[in-house]
């Protein structure tokens, strides 16, 4: 068995994958990842870590031929290539149609909306929109998230305000409904809902596998957003049609808020459903907490796991791999039910699943 044949039959780890964005962030990653040269404790323009990614970033600047696509650890193999060349082992008859990220914001992001599947088919020739979910994992002082407009607004009014934002930099932020957040909060941002990540939030984001973001605002901090960056190739009128104008105020917050549900609760193991396929068919997300010799079997693949805290060991036949806070990996289809995670102390794992499938 050669190295690649071995790689595709076991949990797959990746090189770090910081991605350029137009907003500042990333300082909080020193609390999540070990010091490996990527995280110097400052905020910069690489505030996102893309995990087990097959998606290329849409960026005004690029730093590699496939920005955003993950590389298998210790190799030069791009993950999208591996998926294409080893579908039987990695996917079986299933799809891996989600994207997982860490986001850390030092400033408020431009307020934005993501397209529905129907909008994407019509305008981007893509079968995927960009419904997404946020799990808050770290916060700074006065951390906020934004969901929906404060008040009812029309497309025409929004368009006029967007033009005014060229000279009135803060005018768009005043439109949004802000919410104080804390670690552990879970939010589901369905396609069409206007929203923004506020300053001081570190989240795990699970989403459909695209980078389609419409952001009708002229400024992000001191960065001037170009027309192309606002509307990603669409004309303004078409782009603004992606917004659901009927959800605003308290209704928008209630629409986005999700309450986790405990489904297993024993002395050594707790499983919580954070996002289910009933919430959205696009993906699902679970939290596993193990302690004092507890363990769980990784029973669905393809899937992505992130060690959010503590230390643990992945075990399988003739396989043992120690993991710690910040480590993440992809579980191939062929590895389903063949590996378990256990910890003698305490560890928390986030499990991210693709769309609802058999």
Image: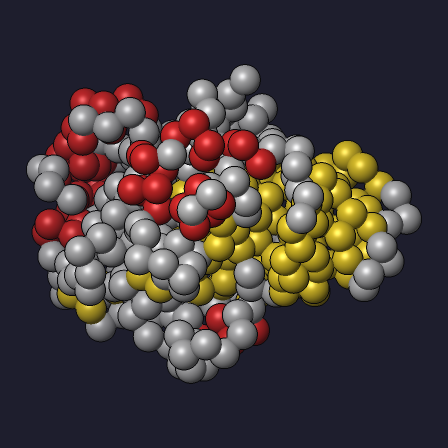
Above or below: residue 69 compared with residue 152:
below
Q: Quadrant of residue 241?
A: top left
- In this view, the residue in front, 291 or 14, is 14
Q: Quadrant of residue 239?
A: top left
Residue 273 point in image, percent of width and height: 67, 37
Residue 1 point in image, percent of width and height: 47, 43
The answer to whether 25 appears left or right of 13 in the picture is left
- In this view, the residue in front, 150 or 36, is 36
Residue 106 point in image, percent of width and height: 41, 71
Above or below: residue 292 compared with residue 272:
below
- In this view, the residue in front, 316 or 189, is 316
Q: How many marks?
A: 0
Residue drawn 65% across and 50% down? 319
Colour scheme used in the picture?
Answer: secondary structure
Above or below: residue 347 compared with residue 177:
below
Residue 299 visible in the picture = yes
Residue drawn 29% across and 70% down? 45
> Among all residues in the image, which is located at the extreme front?
1
Residue 251 visible in the picture = no
The answer to whether 212 appears left or right of 95 in the picture is left
> Among all residues in the image, which is located at the extreme right?
267
Residue drawn 22% across and 72% down? 222
The answer to whether 71 appears left or right of 353 in the picture is left
| The C terminus, quarter of image | top right
Above or below: residue 293 compared with residue 46:
above
Residue 311 point in image, percent of width and height: 70, 64
Residue drawn 21% across and 37% down? 240
Q: Quadrant of residue 211?
A: top left
């Amino acid at each position: 068995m050669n190295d690649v044949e071995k790689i595709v039959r076991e949990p797959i780890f990746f090189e770090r994958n910081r991605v350029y964005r137009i907003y500042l962030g990333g300082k909080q990653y020193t609390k999540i990842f070990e010091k490996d040269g990527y995280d110097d404790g400052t905020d910069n323009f690489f505030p996102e870590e893309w995990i087990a990614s097959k998606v290329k970033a849409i960026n005004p600047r690029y730093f590699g031929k496939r920005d955003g696509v993950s590389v298998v650890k210790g190799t030069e193999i791009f993950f999208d290539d591996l998926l294409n060349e080893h579908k039987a082992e990695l996917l079986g008859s299933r799809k891996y149609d989600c994207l997982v990220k860490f986001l850390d914001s030092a400033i408020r992001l431009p307020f934005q909306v993501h397209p529905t599947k129907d909008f994407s088919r019509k305008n981007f020739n893509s079968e995927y929109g960009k419904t997404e979910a946020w799990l808050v994992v770290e916060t700074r002082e006065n951390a906020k998230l934004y969901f929906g407009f404060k008040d009812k607004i029309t497309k025409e009014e929004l368009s006029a305000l967007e033009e005014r934002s060229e000279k009135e930099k803060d005018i768009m932020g005043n439109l949004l409904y802000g919410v104080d957040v804390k670690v552990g909060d879970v939010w589901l941002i369905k396609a069409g809902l206007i929203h923004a990540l506020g300053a001081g939030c570190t989240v795990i984001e699970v989403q459909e596998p695209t980078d389609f973001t419409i952001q009708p605002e002229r400024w992000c901090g001191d960065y001037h957003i170009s027309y192309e960056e606002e509307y990603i190739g669409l004309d303004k009128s078409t782009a603004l049609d992606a917004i659901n104008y009927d959800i605003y105020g308290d209704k928008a917050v209630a629409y986005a808020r999700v309450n986790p549900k405990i489904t297993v609760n024993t002395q050594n193991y707790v499983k919580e459903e954070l996002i289910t396929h009933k919430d959205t068919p696009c993906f699902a997300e679970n939290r596993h907490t193990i302690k004092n010799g507890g363990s769980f079997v990784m029973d669905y693949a393809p899937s992505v796991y992130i060690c959010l805290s503590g230390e643990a060991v992945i075990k399988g036949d003739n396989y043992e791999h120690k993991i710690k806070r910040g480590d993440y990996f992809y579980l191939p289809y062929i590895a389903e039910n063949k590996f378990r995670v256990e910890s003698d102390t305490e560890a928390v794992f986030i499990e991210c699943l693709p769309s609802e499938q058999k």
